[in-house]
Amino acid sequence: MRDNRFGRAGTSALAAALVGWSVAGPRIPTPWRVPMHAAVATILLMVTGAPMGLRPPRLWSGLRLGSAVAAVAVAGIATTTLVPVVRQSMAGRAVPDSAPVWLLWQIPVGTVWAEEAAYRAALTSVAADTFGASKGRLLQAAAFGLSHIADARATGEPVLPTVLATGTAGWFFGWLANRSGSLLAPMLAHLAINASGAGAALILQRRLLSSSR
């Protein structure tokens, strides 16, 4: 275990600050939002000195586990698009004007990198040093779930189910990082879930648009 430089108060403050940042983040002008999220996460990595496991042999462990989970996630999302209620939800999902920017910039950098670096690396590392591995993972999962309240309200999604679902996902991503010893594992899984969901919504909406012409 590393030296605990933050303590209970500092660790709790970091978790609360990340939740607060999720409220302030959407107010940042759109052109600056992604780089700001990525920059904040990178700064947190530097300040906390959190290990990322992006060098061999942990890198290969993260690649194997992350790829396996990503493949299952993509297959699962593709299968759920056959369910009418899921198709209806995707058809009504708000999507950005530029699909390439969404898929190649906003999701991988502004969401996956920013959230995995901030929550699964920085916060998890500090929380594990303070409370132990299991409680530390629960703390980051709780903070991750609460950080999606603003998104749920903005999109009209039910808040409690959103918090529970994203909190569970945060715990699972934390487990992947711990299991593999590499941040690459949750990054690949997170990217697969978000990108395949976004891609499915784009494809479905374009098909519906074409069929209505």
Image (cartoon, rainbow, N blue to C red):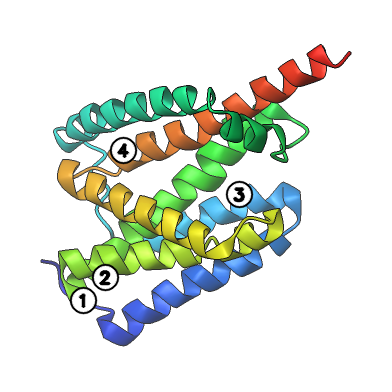
* Tag 2 near tag 3, CB within 8 Å: no
The N terminus: image quadrant: bottom left
Give the mark, 3 or 1, whose residue is nearer the N terminus. Answer: 3
Under mark 3, the amino acid is Pro
| Residue at image coords 14%, 67% | 2
Local SS, label 4: helix
* Tag 3 near tag 1, CB within 8 Å: no
Give the mark, 1 or 4, whose residue is nearer the N terminus. Answer: 1
The C terminus: image quadrant: top right
Res. 127 mark: 2
Under mark 1, the amino acid is Thr
Local SS, label 2: helix
Q: CA distance from mark 2 to mark 1?
A: 5 Å
Q: Which callout, 4 or 3, points to the residue nearer the camera?
A: 4
Q: Which callout, 2 or 3, points to the residue nearer the camera?
A: 2
Q: Closer to the camera, 10 or 16?
A: 16
Question: Crowding at label 4, few (<14), some or many (≥20) Cα neighbours within 10 Å?
Answer: many
Q: CA distance from mark 3 to mark 1?
A: 30 Å
Q: CA distance from mark 2 to mark 4?
A: 20 Å
| Residue at image coords 29%, 49% | 172
Under mark 2, the amino acid is Ala
Local SS, label 3: helix
Q: CA distance from mark 1 to mark 4?
A: 24 Å
| Residue at image coords 53%, 51% | 38
Name the residue beneath numbered marker 3. 35
- Spot occupied by residue 83 in the image (x, y as percentages of width and height): 53, 28
Residue 157 location, quadrant: bottom right
Give the mark, 4 or 3, whose residue is nearer the N terminus. Answer: 3
Name the residue beneath numbered marker 4. 184
